[in-house]
Amino acid sequence: MQPKSILKKTTVPTNGAPGTKPVNQRHLHVALHHANLIEQRKRVEAEVLDSIMTLMDYPTAPDADPKRPTPADAQFFRDAIIPFQPSDYDALIEERNIADKCGYALCPRPKKKARSTAKKQFIDTEYGVEIVDKKVLEVWCSDDCAKRALYVKVQLDEEPAWMRQGGHGDKLELMVDNAADLHKTLPLRLKKEAAVEKSKDDEDDIEDAWAARDDAMQDLAVERGEKPDQVSKANNELVRDQITERTPSDVPPQPPTLPSQSLEHTMAIEGHVPRHDRRAEEDEEEDDLQDWEKHLPG
Amino acid sequence: MEDTKYNNSLIRMWRVWRTTKEMMNERGYLVVEDDMTISLEDFARRYAREDGEPDRSRLNFSCQPSEEMLVKYTPAPTKKDPNPQPAIGTIWVEFNSDENVGLKQLRDYMGHLLNGSFYSGIMVTVKPMTGMAIRLLRGATGMSDGPKGGVEVFVEQDLLVNITKHELVPKHVLLSAREKAQLLERYRLKETQLPRIQSTDPVAKFLGLRRGAVVKIIRKSETAGRYASYRWVI
Ligand SMILES: [Zn+2]
């Protein structure tokens, strides 16, 4: 007996326009793509909200030092804000401020409190009295925190996390004074706490691990039919999961300063320019003042 | 002008409070008539601080649903649930006095509703909440961290006047589960075939209409006298 197909016969409409099916297929793909984006967007937004609610109460210890965060706090903060856009980061600062906290997530201190409810405030600085917006004054506990917080903000990706292609900025750096401490714990998350000193063996192990990974990547490339020296489809640079740390040095961490006064506006934090090394200019002003006084009669 | 002896902020708050009471009444909660018609003088005597500013913390109140409202909010019985409970209960209305309202206040408020076993809540704020608080609010309805009936937030500005009293706004009447079933039966319709109204529509928001409900809209017409249409809340 002739074997009979159990598959349904595909009916091909004889007068159907050629290519009807692929077009429908394409519509379906477009629809799916959009549905996926919406889904991912929802997920990212919920994730960001969750992170903000956690980071509102950061750091975990009330006596934490924003200059020297604990490895766990630093790690959480850095991981949590990877999907953040700068506007999400502003939202975090806003929520912390509403809860009377310094805007920098690793600082446990309250935000500065203006002495009155006036919109413009006079504040004493080491350079004399300055006039500052009340809003600006009440964001941070100190200029130091403002710098550390801004240092993080400038590294955030403007692109929404659900639109980012091929991974995203997973190399966020914090401005810390104890980079050495963090360096030990962060890149080697799987290691036991006991291994405080990084031994020679450890480093060899790490090198071996990287070499093994490169081999594996090459095998994978061959399997995919790529030529060995060609740029891989799964580009190494895009998927590398390495956390870079500021290497410790004797020089205290410097905010991204700009020597030129004319470019000062780029240093503004929420409209406020933190004073840095402006003694020279200040001296000049004083001289001017004295010169002018000399011209006064009597 | 006699009004000039009262602060503008107190007069504003008097309007907001009266509108809020009217809103609760129109939704079907039990509201004392005198509260909806309170004079500015009485309001000032009861709720003004010594400096003439309104004391918002004294404006908070709770409301019980009327019998009629309980019936309206009771879902249709099913085989699985032949005796369904009304999806409505005591509501807590709070007037927040903070200049900025964010996640902190919203979470505190939700905690308060849960602790006081309120079914739902309305928070009236001086200024719009932060974007993140709105995001939490959107996701919180029916979530474990909020009350069963959800939380609504109004800005004082939105309650200065009662929009449902505007002559161009037709009357909106919520249908009970039974009335809704009868309507769909009569016209042999699925609810998805009805025209829609957003739950964020100002009137829908004022009346607290929930997604899935059907509202009857009664308009006056020069030719037909009055005519009704129905909309499905999305
Ligand atoms: Zn600080």
Image (spheres, coloured by chain):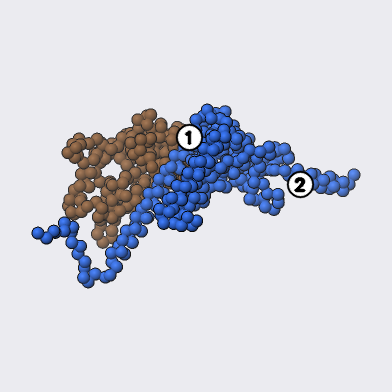
The one nearer the camera, A112 or A34, is: A34
User: Is the residue marked by circle 2 packed among few (<14), some (14-19), or many (20+) residues within 10 Å?
Assistant: few
- Left or right: where A282 falls relative to A70: right
Picture coordinates of residue B154, whole percent (x, y): 42, 43
Picture coordinates of residue B92, whole percent (x, y): 38, 34
Picture coordinates of residue B137, whole percent (x, y): 40, 41
Q: Which chain is brown?
A: B
Quarter-wise, where is residue A179 in the image? top right
Quarter-wise, where is residue A174 in the image? top right
Q: How far apart are labels 2 and 1 at the CA level?
A: 51 Å
Q: Which mark is residue A281?
A: 2
Q: Residue furthest left?
A: A1
Disc 1 element: loop
User: Is the residue marked by circle 1 packed among few (<14), some (14-19), or many (20+) residues within 10 Å?
Assistant: few
Instruction: Give the mark nearest the N terminus, 2 or 1.
Output: 1
- Callout 1: chain: A
Q: Residue at x 46, y 49 (%)?
A: A217
Q: Which residue is mark 1?
A: A190
Q: Which chain is blue?
A: A
Q: Is residue B50 above or below residue A294?
A: above
Dot 2 and dot 1 residues touching (CB under 8 Å): no
In which quadrant is the C terminus of chain A drawn? top right
Amino acid marked by disc 1: Leu
